[in-house]
Image (tube, rainbow, N blue to C red):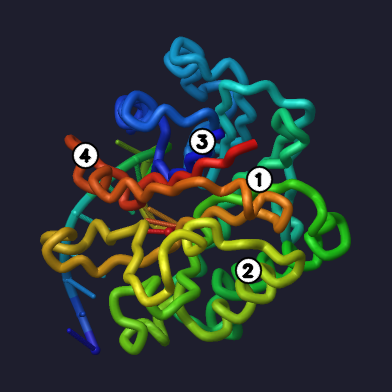
Amino acid sequence: MRIATWNINSVRMRMDLLLRLIDEAQPDVVCLQETKVVDADFPMAPLAEKGYAHAHVHGMKSYNGVAILSKLPFASRDVQHWCGKQDCRHVFAELPGGIELHSVYIPAGGDIPDPEQNEKFAHKLQFVDEMTEWWTTRRSPDRRMVMVGDLNIAPLENDVWSHKELLKIVSHTPVEVAKLTAMQASIGWVDAVRHFVPPTEKLYTWWSYRAKDWAASDRGRRLDHIWVTPPLKDALTGHRILREARGWEPKPSDHVPVMVDLDV
DNA sequence: ATGGTGGGGGACCCA
């Protein structure tokens, strides 16, 4: 089973690039974040034509929005809300084999890395705390689960282009990294991409739109993740970060697709 | 220290 995740930054703006991802990588399941479209307007038809007959979409006007598009049927599906908001950041569904797949979009958190001064950063920290509590109390490490998405946190030193220069930059501050690490430990999540790539190697999934030449400066961050629970660790057979998608014409997303293969 | 580029939707908000 090949699972892809991508912060597409508007599914309507980049439908052609989504079809390109599908043609080139042939995932069984595609999880999206930042779809930026209400469910009634989600462009289903071209995806159904490609064999993605099962779609679990959860979007809103202008902001956020997550989805799971699948060739495989869902045994069940659900949405989860956090921090008392209704902002379309988490959907999940049960795939064949009893695998529960989560597509998640953690708040970016604004610019100032102080929850007292910046309510967006406070929201981000609370979001991770609540989610950690949820995994701990509502889910078991024995369950077969996959969690993917734009977590907006780069936890390791080599998940950013300069650990030292990004310590005070939201996405790599010690406080949010500690919270993400605690969430990972809560039920023993395995970082599926780092399972294949040693922590000494630089690894990015996002490059800012604001760079003059994203590839030349290569100031990236690994914000997009795929985690699996311990029962699926030995099922991991491969991974791919589609770096070239950052250059897809005419208008790339600032995030690139991340994929893993599971032998299930 | 600053400003750089996108999407949405029609002024600014969010990333």
Q: Residues within 10 Å of mark 4 (few under 14, many from 20)?
A: few
Going by the picture, which residue comes out furthest to the right?
A: A137
* Residue at numbered disc 1: A102
Same chain, labels 3 and 4: yes
Give whichever of discs 3 and 1 has the lower sequence position.
3
Instruction: Return the residue at label 3.
Output: A2
Judge if badges 3 and 2 mark residues of a common chain.
Answer: yes
Q: Secondary structure at mark 1?
A: strand
**SS state under label 3:** strand
Q: Residue at x 31, y 31 (%)?
A: A17
Vertical arrangement, residue A133 with respect to residue A44, above or below: below
Q: Give the vertical position of A42 relative to A264 (above or below).
A: above
Relative vertical location of residue A70 with respect to residue A262 in this rendering, above or below: above
- Chain letter of mark 3 equals A
Q: Residue at x 46, y 18 (%)?
A: A47
User: Which residue is the site of mark 4?
Assistant: A248
Q: Determine the CA span between mark 2 and mark 4.
A: 33 Å
**Left or right placement of residue A171 versus residue A227 in this view:** left
Chain identifier of the residue bearing label 2 in the image: A
Q: CA distance from mark 4 to mark 1?
A: 27 Å
Find the distance from the CA under tag 3 to the CA under tag 4: 22 Å
Q: Nearer the viewer, residue A102 or A61?
A: A102
* Label 2 sits on residue: A123
Q: Position of residue A58 (x, y in %)?
A: 62, 35
Question: Residue flagged by tag 4: what amino acid is it?
Answer: Trp
- Which numbered disc covers residue A19? none
